[in-house]
Amino acid sequence: MTVGEGLGFACMEAESGEAALALLEEQPAHVILTDLIMPNMSGLEFLERVKKMLPRTEVAVMTGHGSVETAVQAMKLGAYDYISKPFTPLEELRLFLRRMAEKIRLVEENQFLRERTNTEMELHGIVGASAKIQDVLRMISRLKDTRTPVLISGESGTGKELVARAIHFRGTFASRPFVAVDCGSLVPTLIESELFGYEKGAFTGAVKTKTGLFQSANGGTVFLDEIGELPLEMQAKLLRVLQEKEVRPVGSNQRIKVDVRIIAATNRDLEAEYRKGAFRKDLYFRLNVVTVHLPSLRERRSDIPMLAHWFLDRYAPGVGIQVTTAAMKALLQYDWPGNVRELENCIERAVALGDCRTIDSGDLPTAMVSPSLASESVGPAPSALTSNDLEDIERATIQRVFEQVKGDKTMAGRMLGISRATLYRKLKRYNIGTRSAVSSVTSTLQ
């Protein structure tokens, strides 16, 4: 048992700064206690590298009486505090570590409270209250402050780039570059020069030196969209960059160090691809450290009303356009092969063709509207829905949103795309938010 475990903490140990950094890449820690005097790598160098790798991790330094000035320097570099050796009594160390742990807890709790409003229902255009999309939002929250490679899977149009941008721009590295690369649109003969850059005269037309996209993203994130489209030869070169963390521009003999986080996305089954030799197995496992899967829109139909209102607010802000019963039925029953992107295009088209007050089935593409739906009578708005299916979806969506925003009616109305007055009517109609309903929800959560 280590000293830390004896004090009530789950601990990892490393015999050197280098070993500790390697361990932290695999398993980040909340609190680190390090000596200042270590072989090969000093405590100050270790501190700087840890704060770069894990900005929110608290690092404390242990010091002898003769190195207090160095300890103060460490605090200027971001250390939490220093503690003098030896620890007499040991309770002094326990209290010291508990203070560090409490600071971590308070920071994370405040961060959660600040972000809950923005992340639970909407994040960088990722909108929804369904269980599957909430799982995605929770993954984003966990990954945003790490440098871990992420592979985002999902059909075209599900919002893979939105997830990549949310991971980058919601986290500690938001002020650093984010470079998106559509691997499927790159000309095969120019992929290497686009990614890694080239020297003047490297090939016909190279009239000046050009910085590659990896160098442009140094310190930030490279998003490789549709990674499965890369040719095998280029996959090998990309793997080398990820392993060695350096690039060699076309026409140059020099290698340039790059520090980038890789987020890749694909609509293919890369495991099946590498099994048939179309994708490198070693690159697959290098990229697939953490996978975030985006569900298709037909797997999260309960989010369609919320998404539709969200896009209405985008393309007709402040107008208050309503969706008729027939139109909403059509949206809910359509299979959406183009997913959220297709729904967005559909709403934009409907706004352009509609009468600025309502969207009816006639404003939707013909393929979305069956003859039976098109001939139904027009209802005034979603608040007057008469279909049992629509009522069930609406009730479940409002219930889930209301629970997740802890009964905040203003927030719930905004997320659902309806006015506060309309929300009150719906809450009363579906008996949501009453004392008995809240008690039932509380009991379920407990």
Image: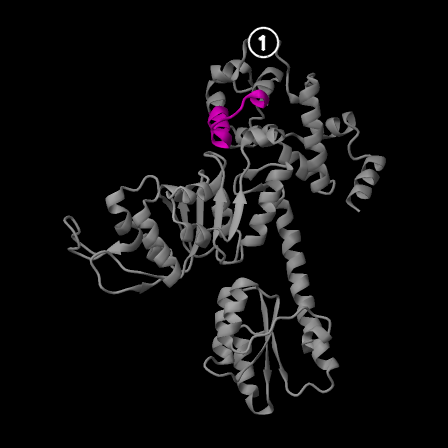
Q: Quadrant of residue 156?
A: top left
Q: Is residue 217 left or right of residue 344?
A: left
Q: Position of residue 220 (x, y in %)?
A: 42, 57
Question: Which residue does the image show at 77% across and 44% down from the upper left?
Answer: 445
Residue 338 within the segment the image draws in magenta: yes
Q: Residue furthest bottom?
A: 66
- The local secondary structure at tag 1 comes to helix
Q: How is the image coloured?
A: one colour
Give the main secondary structure, helix, strand or loop, of the magenta stretch. helix
Q: Is residue 318 visible?
A: no
Question: Which residue does the image show at 51% across and 32% down from the upper left?
Answer: 314
Residue identified by numbered label 1: 372
Q: Is residue 42 left or right of residue 13?
A: left
Label 1 packing within 10 angstroms: few (<14), some (14-19), many (20+) = few
Residue 351 within the segment the image draws in magenta: no
- Camera-side residue of 168 and 132: 132
> Which segment did they paint magenta?
331-348
Q: Position of residue 72 (x, y in %)?
A: 55, 82
Q: Position of residue 335 (x, y in %)?
A: 53, 24
Task: Name the amino acid type tagged 1.
Answer: Ser
Q: Quadrant of residue 68?
A: bottom right
Question: Which residue does the image show at 28% across and 60% down from the upper left?
Answer: 248
